[in-house]
Image (tube, rainbow, N blue to C red):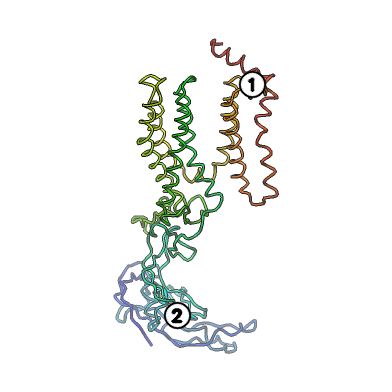
Amino acid sequence: MSTTASGGVRGSCGGSRGTASELSIVRVRELAPDPPPPPRGLGWRRGPLGGGASEPRPGSAGRGRGFGTVARVTRRRGLPGGCGPDVRALRPDRLIPELLQGNQPAANGSTRRKKSRVYSKLKGGRALWTRQSLDSVDIQPACLGLYCGKTLLFKNGSTEIYGECGVCPRGQRTNAQKYCQPCTESPELYDWLYLGFMAMLPLVLHWFFIEWYSGKKSSSALFQHITALFECSVAAIVTLLVSDPVGVLYIRSCRVLMLSDWYTMLYNPSPDYVTTVHCTHEAVYPLYTIVFIYYAFCLVLMMLLRPLLVKKIACGLGKSDRFKSIYAALYFFPILTVLQAVGGGLLYYAFPYIILVLSLVTLAVYMSASEIENCYDLLMRKKRLIVLFSHWLLHAYGIISISRVDKLEQDLPLLALVPTPALFYLFTAKFTEPSRILSEGANGH
């Protein structure tokens, strides 16, 4: 049996470069697998490529029935003898499918031949394509890139036909076999904690600027705090309802495997270093885009509700100070959006430690600024207790995020460390005297 492949393969002969319009692929014979090696001292050599079968060396015993099925690649008849094709220019994707003519397409649409493997050997400057026994191997081009995959085009029962290698649709990511698979898993506890952290950021910033611009004697601060909580809560609920699956308060996601899952745009392959295959998609669906949707709803609800509320109840403030908390939100929302776009993956792995560090620092700053030096100063105002309990909740949130509550009996005792920073501050405040430090700072010393 013989087949012919037209490839325009570059040849080499004494340093010159030629082009062979056709390559002859000759299947010599179907032989049994290799027998055991001959005894020591007996040799074996292949016959000349133009002469056919192998023959034993003089003085050596014969050996079995060859090495398997051999396909010989030669130049087209009529070209100078001894000038084999340039092996580097051979195209396996052209030679192999014709060598395996008559194969039936597999379920995934690729050419599959049972008990067959094709690989190349070099001998005397020529290529030998050899097939050896193997259970089942796909004969198809490899899917390049870390996040490129093949999309399902047609499915009928057990028959699945996949398209070419490229970008996966939204809501899918590649598996180990480079096929695009839908995201059907539920988010893990750590994923929900990350989304909760990103949802808390605008709320905490709202409360901070409301408190900063409302003034100590303003009675409107409490209503603005409640309004900000209402805006963020409604935005979170609406975001969950519009996410897939639509209309329910849960989401389907793909599991985060590594940091590069957040930055697929950095892993687009360039097979020839010129053309880039764009395979950018949301491999961590929907943890990346759902945050942007939430921020958009927060901004819309704030612009609809807060100006009317501030105009009616913020009577103790001047006209220039009433809307400063809203103006501050118009600044920090774009900052949060850029932070999520650029550092979303870093925040995913670092947010538990960010919560712990920031909550400790802000608690120490607040207690020193309020001149709290003992338990009596702490308990004399309800506002201070609210701030203290809020920081304790943040401490607990950070501890749970770090431990992930994998082993409940070992992780729950860590929550006993939540009051430790506040107690440590109260016990050591008499040595540092925060009131004296604040007075000296106000006097310019």
Q: Disc 2 marks which amino acid?
A: Arg
Quick one: quadrant of the N terminus?
Answer: bottom left
* The one of 98 and 179 positioned closer to us in this rendering: 179
Q: Which mark is residue 113?
A: 2
For the image, the number of numbered tags is 2
The image shows residue 122, relative to residue 373, as above or below, that is below
Foreground pick, 149 / 94: 149
> How many neighbours does mark 2 have within 10 angstroms: few (below 14), some (14-19), or many (20 or more)?
many
x then y, percent, for residue 392: 61, 35
Q: Secondary structure at mark 2?
A: strand
Q: Taking the image as drawn, is residue 30 in sight?
A: yes
Q: Residue 101: percent from the left, percent from the top?
A: 38, 82
Dot label at residue 4 = none
- Residue 207, compared with residue 111, is above or below; it is above
Relative image position of residue 422 (x, y in whole percent): 65, 29
Secondary-structure class at tag 1: helix
Disc 1 target residue: 377
Few, some or many residues within 10 Å of mark 1 (<14, 14–19, 20+):
few
Nearest to the observer: residue 309 or residue 415: 309
The answer to which image quadrant residue 138 occupies is bottom left
Quadrant, the C terminus: top right
Q: CA distance from mark 1 to mark 2?
A: 82 Å
Q: Name the front one of labels 1 and 2.
A: 1
Q: Quadrant of residue 429?
A: top right
Relative to 204, is 292 above or below?
below
Given the image, on which type of amino acid does mark 1 rest? Asp
The picture places residue 60, in percent across and down from the top left corner, at: 59, 87
Instruction: Tell me which numbered mark, 1 or 2, is placed earlier along the sequence.
Output: 2
Locate residue 107 relative to residue 408 in the image: left or right.
left
Q: Is residue 126 visible?
A: no
